[in-house]
Image: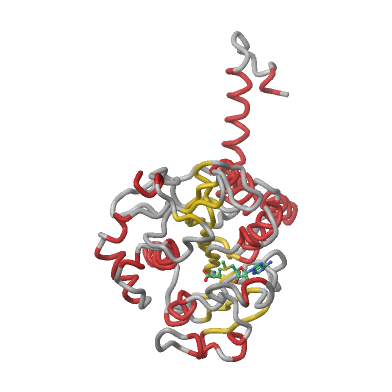
């Protein structure tokens, strides 16, 4: 008689509880940054436009190759697809969710590179009539109207949905992405809720790609994020782990010295560093992976060990396991 070995139900429940704790993923070590060919978690830099493979992705997306090409929207759209391809996150069997997606070009490319791509957005409110009218509700009934190139119509669906309350079951998607949107959801706490939702609907091992506004100087800002706030409000609440460490390379100094001033210079290019009043900011794009129970357990143990070591180090002369570390 053969017997199947199963983990006992209480252990599985315990793993689930551990995995759903806020900050559960924070103890998992983040892999070192790979600067070759290009770092993934990064700010825009003209060097990206010099990379033939990266440039080719921009061409596939049908983005202009003229001066306007030095634009952070082009950076976000191109780098999102470049990174998802490099991480082998998309392919004919994958399911993809866009959050705050409007009717951006990336959706149409993803429809060609996935089994199903679901675009969600409020499709109402401020962005219906904004300068670039990013969330036209007509997309819901007539997505072909906004298509920049031929795409697999059966693989793209639009759905009105609040990014802070996604109408999908846990672990529904292989990839979830959101570009230049979560900072518009109503402040840092709303962005944190959206990140938790992104983490929830992603399957274990799935990849999230999130771009938002990084404050370089003059902060804090109620909607944009300093680097510390990126961790506090976005990465930690997501339950996800960065695929590699964040590249600290800034856009070139000339862009920092002479930023595009909003709103009066909104159409000026190059458009990589912006100024709104005192605040200077640029885009930051992050790729994150959803850890499984084994990773979470290992990360949890590591966190406990590190906290114990910190407590011990903070109290020179304490050598006993019965000392502060044991509390
Ligand atoms: C700056 S636009 C970016 C749109 C698109 N990602 C792009 O890059 O073209 C911000 C988007 O966030 C959407 N949005 C704002 N609040 C939202 C919410 N609570 N849930 C989902 N989408 C929201 C807006 O409707 C808008 O389409």
How many circles with numbers are drawn on the protein? 0
Closer to the camera, 182 or 209? Answer: 182
Quarter of the image for the C terminus: give it: top right
Give the percent coordinates (x, y) of residue 94: 49, 75
Q: Residue furthest front?
A: 264
Residue 69 place in picture, x, y as percent: 35, 67
Q: Where is residue 313 in the image (x, y as percent from the top left)?
A: 58, 18
Nearer-the-camera pick, 164 or 300: 164
In the foreground, 203 or 298: 203
Q: Quadrant of residue 103?
A: bottom right
Q: Image height check: is 24 above or below 154?
A: above
Query: Residue 284: in sight, yes or no?
Result: no
Q: Nearer the viewer, residue 258 or 123?
A: 258
* Vertical relation: 303 (above or below) 234: above
Q: Quadrant of the N terminus?
A: bottom right
154 lies left or right of 83: right
Q: Which residue is drawn at 40% across and 86% down?
A: 149
Residue pushed farthest top? 317
- Image quadrant of ligand 1? bottom right
Residue visible at 34% across and 47% down in the picture: 254
Q: Is residue 327 left or right of residue 95?
A: right
Seen in the image, is 170 located left or right of residue 209? right
On the image, the x and y values in percent for residue 174 come to: 53, 69
Q: Which colour scheme is used?
A: secondary structure
In the rendered image, is residue 94 in sight? yes
In this rendering, position of residue 12 left or right of residue 29: right
């Amino acid at each position: 008689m053969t017997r199947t070995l199963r983990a006992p139900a209480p252990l599985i429940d315990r793993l689930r509880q551990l995995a759903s704790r806020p900050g559960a993923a924070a103890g998992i070590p983040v892999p070192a940054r790979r600067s070759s060919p290009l770092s993934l978690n990064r700010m825009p830099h003209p060097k990206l436009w010099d990379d033939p493979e990266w440039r080719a992705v921009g061409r596939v997306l049908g983005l202009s190759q003229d001066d306007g090409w030095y634009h952070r929207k082009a950076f976000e759209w191109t780098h999102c697809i470049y990174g998802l391809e490099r991480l082998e996150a998309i392919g004919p069997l994958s399911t993809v969710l866009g959050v705050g997606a409007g009717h951006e070009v990336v959706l149409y490319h993803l429809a060609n590179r996935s089994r199903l791509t679901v675009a969600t957005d409020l499709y109402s409110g401020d962005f219906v009539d904004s300068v670039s009218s990013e969330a036209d509700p007509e997309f819901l009934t007539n997505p072909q109207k906004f298509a920049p190139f031929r795409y697999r119509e059966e693989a793209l669906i639009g759905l009105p949905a609040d990014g802070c309350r996604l109408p999908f079951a846990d672990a529904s998607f292989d990839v979830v992405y959101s570009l230049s949107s979560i900072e518009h959801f109503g402040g840092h706490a709303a962005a944190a809720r959206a990140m938790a939702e992104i983490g929830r609907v992603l399957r274990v091992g799935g990849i999230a790609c999130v771009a938002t506004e990084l404050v370089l100087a003059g902060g804090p800002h109620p909607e944009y994020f300093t680097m510390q706030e990126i961790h506090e409000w976005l990465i930690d609440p997501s339950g996800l782990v960065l695929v590699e460490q964040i590249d600290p390379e800034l856009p070139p100094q000339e862009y920092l010295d002479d930023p595009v001033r909003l709103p009066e210079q909104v159409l000026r290019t190059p458009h990589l560093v912006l100024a709104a009043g005192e605040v200077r900011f640029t885009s930051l794009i992050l790729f994150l992976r959803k850890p499984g129970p084994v990773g979470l357990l290992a990360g949890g143990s590591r966190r406990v060990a590190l906290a114990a070591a910190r407590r011990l180090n903070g109290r020179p002369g304490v050598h006993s396991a019965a000392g502060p570390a044991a509390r």
